[in-house]
Image (tube, helix red, strand yellow):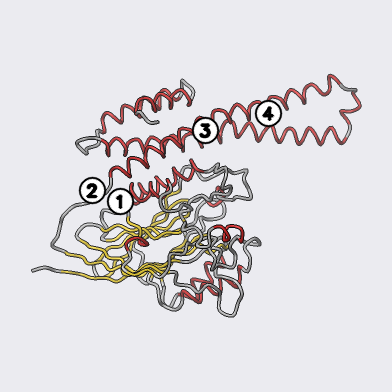
């Protein structure tokens, strides 16, 4: 006799743009978001950029009657900004922080201070096990020169691997959040194909709108110049999913669930649009087929992995140049400080201007030395680790037998790690590219 369990689940995600003293109309918008979540329309809600503790508490208290279970993922200096609200109890919770997260000295970008990563909570509904993941990849602050591309590529791949490694025991896995990447872009491809995820936008039986989630015409905070060029905006917030063992999943609907303006106000709920997807999960308890290692599109996955490896390689090569640049600044300033007393009159040593210059120059020397040594190594290892993990998946995907040879690749990684201590990163990675025939 066939035993079927069925669950209907509606998931909503929103980047709330909750930066203290920076985000416009934050207090009123948070009130409106809390009110919207308290309507009971959603079973699970994933929020990003909740940077103020009181904002999380306010939303939690307002929505607790319909979403009584919640968790904020604390990380870094300011907190990750990520939180999940659920109609059902969260049985297990975990947070994975990425190895690269931007730069500490880019204060106005702030991504590093959040200690960003991907959070997961596990819930069970009528015997159906569901994993909910939420994340917020590094933003692209300059459309012409994306200095964070390599970081975002590593974050995307690590997120996909995290989902892939933790999802086999669930009947449904949902990744919801601000991925800062559009469909078809490298990071979107890495996440989608590495973790074998489907886009709810593409799979929905009914879809309200083709409008994007950022800088679209319906949003009051959108950049007017960008809207003039692309009124639909960019779809950078996503709800991706995969079915697990013994289950079939249908996306009943995809929508932009919130009004274009907060009721009785002239502004939107956020500078991003919220999106929601409703899933129907059918669980056959007698079907024990295993499709966890099935790759639905090897060609797309291979292309995305090769592109990701190339991006990481270029970034690592640039790190070697950056290290030289930082050292050059430190040495130049140090020599200048030593030379001033020699080429000038003694009284200048007692002047306020000279003393202030010594303090400033010393600070710059210390900063550039730290960037050339400690920080350079942290970023290098983060990028190299991401690149090697992508290479492992690429090897497994392109292997004719479909089986990953752990012995061979372990030897390769061990060799690379040993050589890293002896040779420059440029030489090592150029050899790796030639070995793998990556163009």
- Left or right: 284, with 236 as reference point: left
Vertical placement of 132 versus 5: above or below? above
- Left or right: 296, with 202 as reference point: left
- Marked residue nearer the N-terminal end (4 or 3): 4
Q: Which mark is residue 294?
A: 2
On the image, the x and y values in percent for residue 31 come to 56, 74
User: In what element is the residue under mark 2?
Assistant: loop
Nearer to us in this view, 366 or 323: 323
* Cα distance between the residues tagged 2 and 1: 8 Å
Q: How many marks?
A: 4
User: In what element is the residue under mark 3?
Assistant: helix
Q: Are marks 2 and 1 in contact (CB under 8 Å)?
A: yes
Q: Are marks 3 and 2 in contact (CB under 8 Å)?
A: no
Foreground mark, 4 or 3, reads 4
On the image, the x and y values in percent for residue 354 come to 84, 32
* Cα distance between the residues tagged 4 and 3: 18 Å
Q: Which mark is residue 329?
A: 4
- Marked residue nearer the N-terminal end (4 or 1): 1
Q: Residues within 10 Å of mark 1 (few under 14, many from 20)?
A: many
* Cα distance between the residues tagged 3 and 1: 32 Å
Q: Residue furthest bottom?
A: 264
């Amino acid at each position: 006799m066939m035993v079927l369990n069925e669950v209907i689940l509606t998931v909503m995600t929103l980047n709330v743009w909750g930066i203290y003293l920076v985000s416009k109309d934050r207090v009123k918008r948070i009130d409106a978001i809390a009110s919207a979540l308290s309507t009971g329309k959603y079973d699970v809600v994933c929020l990003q950029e909740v940077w103020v503790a009181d904002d999380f508490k306010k939303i939690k208290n307002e929505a607790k009657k319909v979403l009584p279970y919640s968790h904020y993922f604390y990380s870094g200096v300011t907190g990750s900004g990520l939180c999940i609200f659920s109609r059902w109890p969260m049985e297990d919770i975990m947070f994975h922080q990425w190895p690269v997260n931007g730069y500490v000295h880019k204060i106005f970008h702030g991504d590093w201070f959040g200690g960003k990563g991907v959070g997961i909570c596990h819930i069970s509904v009528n015997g159906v096990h569901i994993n909910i993941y939420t994340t917020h990849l590094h933003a692209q602050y300059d459309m012409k020169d994306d200095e964070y591309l390599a970081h975002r590529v590593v974050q995307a791949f690590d997120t996909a691997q995290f989902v892939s490694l933790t999802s086999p025991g669930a009947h449904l896995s949902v990744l919801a959040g601000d991925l800062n990447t559009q469909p078809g872009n490298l990071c979107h491809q890495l996440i989608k194909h590495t973790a074998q995820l489907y886009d709810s936008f593409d799979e929905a039986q009914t879809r309200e709108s083709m409008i994007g989630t950022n800088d679209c015409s319906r949003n009051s905070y959108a950049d007017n110049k960008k809207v003039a060029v692309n009124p639909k905006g960019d779809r950078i917030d996503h709800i991706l999913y995969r079915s697990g063992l013994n289950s079939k999943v249908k996306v009943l609907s995809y929508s932009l669930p919130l009004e274009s303006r907060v009721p009785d106000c002239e502004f939107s709920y956020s500078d991003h649009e919220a999106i929601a997807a409703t899933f129907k999960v059918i669980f056959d308890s007698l079907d024990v087929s295993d499709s966890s290692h099935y790759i639905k599109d090897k060609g797309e996955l291979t292309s995305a992995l090769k592109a990701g490896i190339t991006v990481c390689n270029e970034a690592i090569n640039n790190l070697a140049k950056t290290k030289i640049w930082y050292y050059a600044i430190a040495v130049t300033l140090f020599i200048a400080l030593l030379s001033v007393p020699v080429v000038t009159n003694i009284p200048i040593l007692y002047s306020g201007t000279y003393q202030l210059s010594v303090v400033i120059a010393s600070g710059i020397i210390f900063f550039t030395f730290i960037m050339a040594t400690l920080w350079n190594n942290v970023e290098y290892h983060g990028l190299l680790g991401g690149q090697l993990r992508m290479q492992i998946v690429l090897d497994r995907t392109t292997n004719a037998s479909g089986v990953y040879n752990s012995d061979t690749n372990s030897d390769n990684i061990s060799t690379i790690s040993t050589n890293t201590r002896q040779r420059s990163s440029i030489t090592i990675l150029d050899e790796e590219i030639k070995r793998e025939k990556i163009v």
